[in-house]
Amino acid sequence: MDKSIFTALNSMQILKNNQSVLAQNLSNTNSVGFKKDIHANFGSLYMDRQKGIDPRVFALSDVGSFDSSQGPMNPTDRKLDLAIDGTGYFIVKPEQGPVALSRRGDLKVGPDGLLRDNTGAQIYSVDLEPIEIPPFKDITFSADGIITIEPLNAEPGQQVVVGQIATTQGGENVKLVKSLDGFIRTEEGGIPEPDQISTLVSGFLEGSNVKSVDELVASIEQSRAFEVNVKFIKTAKELDEATASLMRMPN
């Protein structure tokens, strides 16, 4: 069999993975704070040969990352909805898995009194502990994450600070990656320290930064590239069969 087929198969595997990434992005077009995954880019590896020139190459791909650009800021007029204006992340503890970073700010107070987002992840304080919210009549969030409530049975106008939401910019020279659970962590699986530099805006939610049209166009391009490789394999098979027939001894 012509070895060029293996080159085409390698390219097809990369294209298949890219299609999965594009499908994942499209399915999260309306997810709060979602950061789109970036499909792998192609590169080429020339095979080494001691004598002569071997034109065969293998397709390589860079490890896919995610787009950290800000999504649209959508007003909700709900005090428990928070958005990060600019760069930065909330520090959260998912229901399963280690502490992570998130841009999701659709918050709620659970039955246990802990502040969570709508996935159930606990919102952590600057002390990297869960934030417990007592029963309240009113709640406000400052730009640096300080939570102030008017207790349920308190006198009118009484304000109590109950915690401060932890945020981080990610740290210098720290590469952030998206884990399989969709949360963001460092390459080593940890999180950067809180720095409280990010600016929070109450009454807004950040939308997904996925652009549906771009993802659909990319999906069409990936499908066409896949078809090209399929045709290439068929052509290589025909050439291989024709070469084999020439090598047969006549009867």
Image (cartoon, rainbow, N blue to C red):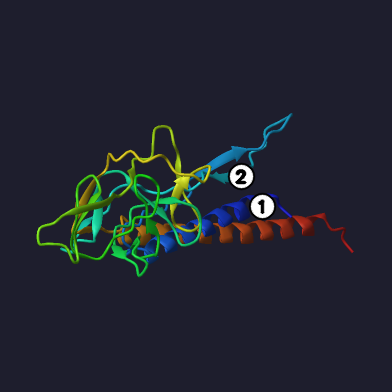
* Disc ID at residue 6: 1
Q: Position of residue 186 (x, y in %)?
A: 47, 43
Q: Nearer the viewer, residue 167 or 174?
A: 167
Q: Nearer the viewer, residue 175 or 237?
A: 175
* Residue at left offset 44%, top offset 58%: 94
Secondary structure at numbered mark 2: strand
Mark 1 or 2, nearer chain start: 1
Q: Is residue 40 visible?
A: yes
Q: Position of residue 92 (x, y in %)?
A: 39, 53
Q: Position of residue 224 (x, y in %)?
A: 46, 60
Q: Residue furthest right?
A: 251
Q: Nearer the viewer, residue 152 or 12?
A: 152
Label 2 is placed on what type of residue?
Answer: Phe
Question: Which residue is disc 2 drawn over?
Answer: 58
* Residue at left offset 90%, top offset 64%: 251
The quarter holding residue 208 reads: bottom left
Label 1 is placed on what type of residue?
Answer: Phe
Describe residue 58's horizontal placement relative to residue 75 as left or right. right
Describe residue 44's horizontal placement relative to residue 49 as left or right. left
Distance of label 1 from label 2 (alpha carbons) = 8 Å
Within 10 angstroms of label 2, few (less than 14), some, or many (20 or more) residues?
A: some
Work out which quarter of the rendered image holds the N terminus and state it.
bottom right
Describe residue 2's horizontal placement relative to residue 157 as left or right. right
* Residue at left offset 56%, top offset 44%: 60
Q: Are marks 1 and 2 in contact (CB under 8 Å)?
A: yes
Q: Position of residue 97 (x, y in %)?
A: 51, 57
